[in-house]
Structure formats: structure tokens, C-alpha cells
Image: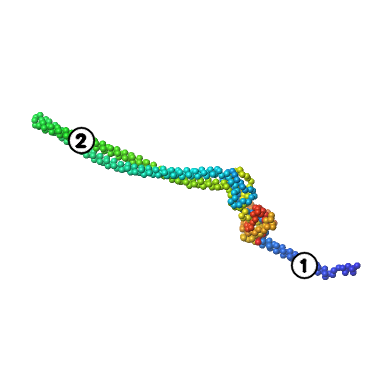
Amino acid sequence: MDTTSAATQPPPEHAASKKSLGRAIGIGVAVVSLAMLALVVLQVDLHPRTDDASVRANFIEIAPEVSGRLVDLPVKDNAFVKQGDTLFVIDPRPYEYALKQALSDQDALEQQIVDARRHIAAQTSAAEAQRANLANSRTGIQTAGTQIDASAAAVARAQAASTAADAQLKLATNNLHRIEPLLKRQYATVEQVDQANTAVRVAQGNYDEAQAALMQAQAAQQQANFHKIEAASLAVEQQAKLGQAVHTIDTVDTLVSQRPAKAAKVESARLDLERTRVVAPFNAYVTNLNLSVGAYARPGAPLFTLIDTRTWYVIANYRESKLKNIHLQDPVDVFLMGHPDRHFSGTVESVGYGVFPEDGGVAQGLPNIDRTLNWVHLSARFPVRIRVLDPDPTLFRIGATAVTVVR
């Protein structure tokens, strides 16, 4: 029994070699595993990846700029629309009426300006006529003044003639009174007395004629004074009429100054009418549409949202320890969680520079620092904005989960 069992056991040298081979294989596997692990760690460090990423796109809320009832709503929720497609139409009738009213007011103003210019042309002619009348009145004043001077000279001459005739009458009368007593004593003849009487009558006639001429000259003087006063009054009246005519000419400027306001109202009414029809500003998907035709739209109140399909982004949150290997314009591999078989190319567009710290509280204007200390610190994550270069709008959705690898 002992001889047979000793014959079946392997030699000690063979067992030792197997043990050494197993130890070598184990060490080799461990070394390869460590090398692979180091390579993986190096690759992960040099080419950071994360599945904490989501798809983003620009979007806008569509809100009307005018109010009214919706009369047409051709789009549907989650439908694709092209740039220029009609999104909705607000009842345009009130704005058509407003535009017609603004155009009518503008035309009425133009007619007022035309009529005012015609009236001003007439007033200008009247003003010129008033200027001519004023010039005539001033000439009349000068003429009346000349007539007054001539009348004063005539009065002076008539007064002198009257004085001379009065003196001649007195002389003839005195001669008659001296000769008449001499006739009784026959110191004077009858003929001499008759001659004296004739001289008195002639002198009396000359005196009467001189008095009449004096009265006529005085009357002419008074009439000349009246003409001067009348001409002065007429000149004042013509001056007032001229001022009124000139004031009327200036009123057209007020009407002309209203033109910009009327034109602005027309443009505003035309713009409001154009705003009753709202079109898509870009290719987009309609979302959050929860209304129907007949709803009342108010300015600034969003009706639905448009997702801009022209540009898609992925916001990937990387640990702060990985940011050292992420640079602007680095190429990025992008995979969607819902379509992991599709590969998309991207590029790093920006790296975030701030996130809100967990211990960043403020109390009464001073930093509030926690007195406790955690032994395990979690690294912060910063958003990296990645622009997708070859997006498929049918697969990309805002908020979809993505996996990114920076190359």
C-alpha cells in the first residue's frame, strides 16, 4: 500500500513548478489588470465623459402684440412649423377700421391744409390790398396836410383883403360924412356927394366880398382839417386790417405741424393690423399649445412655445477635477440615452464659471459658515455647453438624457 501510493504522488519538483507557474500567472493577471485600470483611468482623465447631461435648445414664448379673438389657429401641439408659416390670426376687423380711420384723418388734414393755403392766398391778396390802401391813406394824410397849408394861406390872404376892404369902407364913409354937411352950405356940389356915396357903396361891396372870401377860405380850411382826420382814421383802420390779414397767414403752420402725428397714427394702425397675423420666425416645434379658435389673446400673454430646431446643445455637468482637460472647441462624442446606437459630433462652446455653493448662505449680511466639517467631500460639478454639429431634429428633445465624451 505504501509503495503504490508513493508511486501515484507527483514528484516534489513537478508540484513546485506548477505552484510557481500559478503564482506567475496570478501576478501577470494582476499586473495586466493594474495596467488596464491605469490605462482606463488615464483615458477617463484625458477624455472626460459623463452621463449627467441633458439636451437643450433655444425656445421662445409666442405672445401676441395686439388683443382680440383668435379666428385662425392652423398649428397643432408638438407639430413642426417652417419659417414664415402662419401660427395664428387675430380678428383683424377692428384694426382695419382703425387704419381706415387713421387714413381718413390724414386725408382730412391734407384737405384742411389745402383749404387753408387757398384761404391764405386770398388773405395774402387781401393783405397786399390793405397795404395799398394803407399807402393811399398815408398819401391822403399828406395831401390833406398840404390842403390845410394852402387853406391857411388862403385864409390869411382873405383876412388881409377883408382888413383892407374894411379900411377902404371906413375911409369912404368918413368922406361922405364930411361932404354931406357941406352940400347945405353949398361948399360941395351934388356931384361930389354922389361920388362919395358911390365910393361908400363900392367900398361896402368890396368889404362884403372880402368877408365872403374869408368865410370861404375858413370853410376850406376846416374841410381840409376834416379830411386829414378822416385820412388818419382810415390809415389806422387799414393798419388793423393788415395786421389781421398777416396773423391769418401764420395759421397754416399749426396744421402742417400735425402731419407727423397723423402719419405716425397711420403707421401704428398699419403695424397693429400686420400684427394680427403671427408667423413662425424660424423652423421650430410647437409645444405647450392648450387653446382653440375663439380664445381671447392679450398682448404679452404667452399662448404657446416654439423650440428652435436650428441649433441644439448639450449641457454636460463635469466634475471640477475633469475641467483641466476640457478646452474650448474640443471635439465631443454625443450619444442620446434614447438612441444609444446613434453617434453625434459636437464641440465645446463654453465652460461654466459658477455654481451656487451648498454652504453659501448669508445671515444678517455676513457669511454663514457651518461649524461642522465633513470628512468626505464631494467634488462640485460645473456645466459645460456643447454644441451639436449634426443634430437630428426628429430625435433631439429638450431635457433628453445624453452621454458625452470629450476627445
Task: Give whichever of 89, 299 is nearer the camera.
Answer: 89
* Residue identified by numbered label 1: 24
Q: Separation of disc 2 and disc 1 at Cα?
A: 176 Å
Name the residue furthest left: 186
* Residue at 29% from the left image edge and 42% from the top image edge: 143
Judge the density around disc 2: few (<14), some (14-19), many (≥20) Cα neighbours within 10 Å. Answer: some
* Residue at 15% from the left image edge and 34% from the top image edge: 199
Pinpoint residue 85: horizontal percent, then vertical percent. 59, 50
Pinpoint residue 375: horizontal percent, then vertical percent. 69, 56
Judge the density around disc 1: few (<14), some (14-19), many (≥20) Cα neighbours within 10 Å. Answer: few
Type of the residue with mark 2: Glu
In the image, taking residue 109 as reference, residue 160 lies left or right, namely: left
Type of the residue with mark 1: Ala
| Label 2 secondary element | helix
Task: Give whichever of 367, 70 is nearer the camera.
Answer: 70
Looking at the image, can residue 161 be seen? yes
Pinpoint residue 373: horizontal percent, then vertical percent. 68, 55
Pinpoint residue 381: horizontal percent, then vertical percent. 66, 56
| Label 1 secondary element | helix
Q: Height in image: 141 above or below 355?
A: above
* Residue at 77% from the left image edge and 65% from the top image edge: 26
Looking at the image, can residue 169 be seen? no
Quadrant of the image for the C terminus? Answer: bottom right
Name the residue furthest top: 184
When asked about the image quadrant of residue 174, the answer is top left
Kindly identify which numbered label has been placed on residue 209. Answer: 2
- Mark sitting earlier along the chain (2/1): 1
